[in-house]
Image (cartoon, helix red, strand yellow):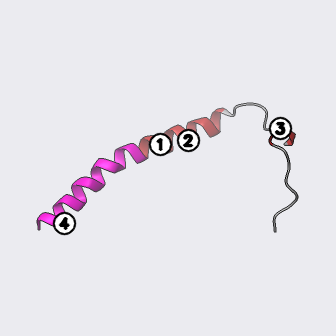
Amino acid sequence: MLGPETPSGDIEGMDTINAGDTAWVLGSAGLVLLMTPGLALFYGGMVRA
């Protein structure tokens, strides 16, 4: 169940940039960038067969 809405600046402990969260987002984005050409080659091979 969702609680009452809080303004964006009212959440405690969320006022600094967390290095772990930043690394996770950058790592995930990097994996997606590597995955995209792989999927293109995979689907291209399926169409050609």
Q: Is residue 12 above or below residue 46?
A: above
- Kindly identify which residue carries mark 3: 9
Disc 3 versus disc 1: nearer the observer: 3
State how far apart marks 2 and 1 are (Cα).
Answer: 6 Å
Other residues around mark 1 within 10 Å, as few (<14) / some (14–19) / many (≥20): few
Looking at numbered disc 1 in the image, what kind of residue is underneath it? Ala
State how far apart marks 4 and 1 are (Cα).
Answer: 26 Å
Tag 2 near tag 3, CB within 8 Å: no
Q: Is residue 5 above or below residue 13?
A: below
Tag 4 near tag 2, CB within 8 Å: no
Q: How many marks can you see?
A: 4
Percent position of residue 34, x then y: 35, 44
The quadrant in which residue 18 appears is top right
* Residue at position x 63%, y 37% in the image: 20
Q: Left or right: 42 with respect to 7?
A: left
Looking at numbered disc 2 in the image, what kind of residue is underneath it? Val
- Kindly identify which residue carries mark 2: 25
- Kindly identify which residue carries mark 4: 46
- For the N terminus, the quadrant is bottom right
